[in-house]
Amino acid sequence: MLVLSRKTGESIIIDGQITVHILKSDKETVKIGVDAPKDIPIFRKEIHDEIRFSNQKAATAPDTDLTKLKTPVMAK
């Protein structure tokens, strides 16, 4: 892990295309801004972890869960 010290108004650049701006710093909170291309998703870690967990859960769902779905009624 790279650890950097930055002051309010300073920035870091990642991979030449993502800029992280330090907007405000209080005793226990740092407000940051992120500039990145629109095709790069940006999530808070806890949201990213929840998405990964949900995707893993869906990918490993037992086949029996599919039987709970209703069979579509075919029109005659």
Image: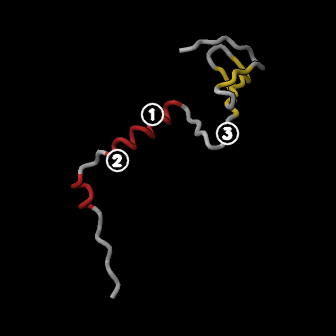
Residue 33 relative to residue 41: left or right: right
In the image, residue 73 above or below residue 64: below
Instruction: Tell me the number on the disc at residue 49.
Output: 1
Three-letter code, disc 2: Ala
How far apart are labels 1 and 3 at the CA level?
A: 22 Å
* Quarter assignment of residue 5: top right
Mark positioned earlier in the residue sequence (3 or 2): 3
Q: Are marks 3 and 2 in contact (CB under 8 Å)?
A: no
Q: Residues within 10 Å of mark 3 (few under 14, many from 20)?
A: few
How far apart are labels 3 and 2 at the CA level?
A: 29 Å
Q: How is the image coloured?
A: secondary structure
- Residue highlighted by disc 3: 37
Three-letter code, disc 1: Asp
How far apart are labels 1 and 2 at the CA level?
A: 14 Å
Three-letter code, disc 3: Pro
Instruction: Tell me the number on the disc at residue 58.
Output: 2
Q: Is residue 33 or residue 16 the one in the foreground?
A: 16
Q: Residues within 10 Å of mark 1 (few under 14, many from 20)?
A: few
Residue 7 relative to residue 56: left or right: right
Mark positioned earlier in the residue sequence (1 or 3): 3
Residue 62 relative to residue 49: left or right: left
Question: In terms of secondary structure, where does tag 2 sit?
Answer: helix
* Quarter assignment of residue 50: top left
Q: Is residue 14 or residue 49 the one in the foreground?
A: 14
Q: Is residue 52 or residue 40 the one in the foreground?
A: 40
Residue 22 relative to residue 65: left or right: right
Q: Residue at x 70, y 33 (%)?
A: 35
Q: Residue at x 33, y 88 (%)?
A: 76
